[in-house]
Amino acid sequence: MTAVPPSPSAPPSPEAASGPGAARPLALRARRVLDVRAGRTIADGVVVCRGDRIEQVGGPPPADAELLDLGDRTLMPGLIDTHTHVLLQGNRTREAYAHQILREDPAHRVVRAVRSLGIALAHGFTTLRDLGTEGCGYADVAIRDAVSEGVVPGPRLLVAGPAIGRTGSYPILGYRSDWRFPVGVAECEGEEGCRSEVRRAVARGVDWIKVYATQGRGLHVTDDGYLDAPPPWTQAELDALVDEAHRQGLRVAAHASEATGTDMAVSAGADTIEHGYSIRPATASAMAERGIALVPTLLVAREVSAHRAAERGAPWTEVPAIHRRSVENCRQAGVPIVCGTDAGGFEWEDVNQAEELRILVDLGWSPLEAIRSATLLAARLLDREGRIGELTAGAAADLAACPGDPLEDIDRILDVDAVVRAGRVVVAPPAGPPRPAG
Ligand SMILES: [Zn+2]
């Protein structure tokens, strides 16, 4: 991470950006402006932002505009990561996780979360769906609200509060039975218990419900080469949880790593499958039919699975190959595959979230397909198509720019060095010509 997080003295407040004193439009000119919908770049394009919205794309800028010339860069919509944990700082080992849950005061974790927001912005991510506070209650709701008030700079946040897990199925586990510890999820059981937990989350102001549809205990490889384990919930419990969320107008993200729990989550009508380590072709077809998206989190799989394999041995050693097959099954079936990294599962400071896009290209995707997974498709998943994830009049003025052309070389997207959030420049491009590739 070389970029400097934005100064707290210039918060990207949507309110401030659209208030008096911010009436002068901001015009950004770049050698290439990426139209993700059309799948092409516009040469020497101009994007005009007024307040926190994009006012026009192309055409001459208004006479009173403040002009920012980005030179030989590609200007694109701000990126969207649909699976993060701003309150986690790496989860490679059980010890790293337990340290954060048991020893760190929530206030300490919140301050680090603010740093995570700056890192995400510096990497060009202007919207995050944050899926679970892991022992930090509803701190994400408070962080989301503080960002939207302009107290601290940060990406737009959609939050889930504590993920919901079945009683006794989620760490902290394995200590003395007469001790009580904080755990990483909100625990519940029974159909009515599941409905109550969803109602509690709704009352606290979450945007999404996250459920652990699988738990990993008893993990094994099946005869047909997929991963499975006994599921934590009954089908009736999972059905009740998803039904209650939908009745309350919220959608459900299901952590689903093993085949049986994944099938149950799909059958219950969960809206997204997170990780998807074990998806057979028939499950992928059912997901496509129901419009259920896959968020494959390939980056955390790469970053953490090696540690997990070393810590736990087989069958974790087989997970990467099975995961890749599952993602391919979804691709063949036409399932929307959306960028989500599980940042926070790995250290925010060490790994650029945009590497998820490079992994997709390594799996045979075109750079454009990879970028769409973090823009257009992610906006659709978040029910914000046309409002974020594309450069179009009326959309949010959330933009990122990188030197060179990421449609030619996806690695350039790791070099984002200019970011606008809600119409404010939060990462200013360095003086001089952009850094060359390599
Ligand atoms: Zn996660």
Image: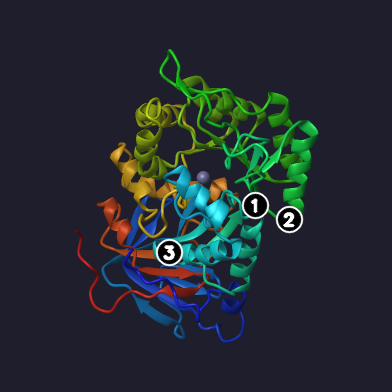
**Is 148 positioned to the left or the right of 427 in the image?**
right
Q: Which residue is mark 3?
A: 119
The answer, for residue 395, to whether it is visible in the render is no
Within 8 Å of ligand 1, the CB of disc 1?
A: no
- Residue that sits furthest to the top in the current view: 223
Q: Is residue 227 above or below residue 242?
A: above
Determine contact: label 1, label 2, CB under 8 Å.
Answer: yes
- Identified at 46% across, 49% down, the residue is 96
Q: Which of pointers 1 and 2 lies earlier in the amino acid sequence? A: 1
Q: Label 3 to label 1, Cα distance in Å?
A: 21 Å
Q: Which of pointers 2 and 3 lies earlier in the amino acid sequence? A: 3
Q: Label 1 to label 2, Cα distance in Å?
A: 8 Å
Q: Which part of the image, by quadrant, shows the C terminus?
A: bottom left
The amino acid on which the numbered mark 3 sits, given as a three-letter code, is Ile
Other residues around mark 1 within 10 Å, as few (<14) / some (14–19) / many (≥20): many
- Identified at 60% across, 29% down, the residue is 266
Q: Which mark is residue 204?
A: 2
Within 8 Å of ligand 1, the CB of disc 2?
A: no
Q: Position of residue 334 (x, y in %)?
A: 47, 31
Q: Label 2 to label 3, Cα distance in Å?
A: 27 Å
The amino acid on which the numbered mark 1 sits, given as a three-letter code, is Gly
Report helix, strand or loop for mark 2: helix
Report helix, strand or loop for mark 1: loop
Q: Nearer the viewer, residue 38 or 138?
A: 138
The amino acid on which the numbered mark 2 sits, given as a three-letter code, is Arg
Q: Nearer the viewer, residue 381 or 393?
A: 381
Q: Which residue is mark 1?
A: 161
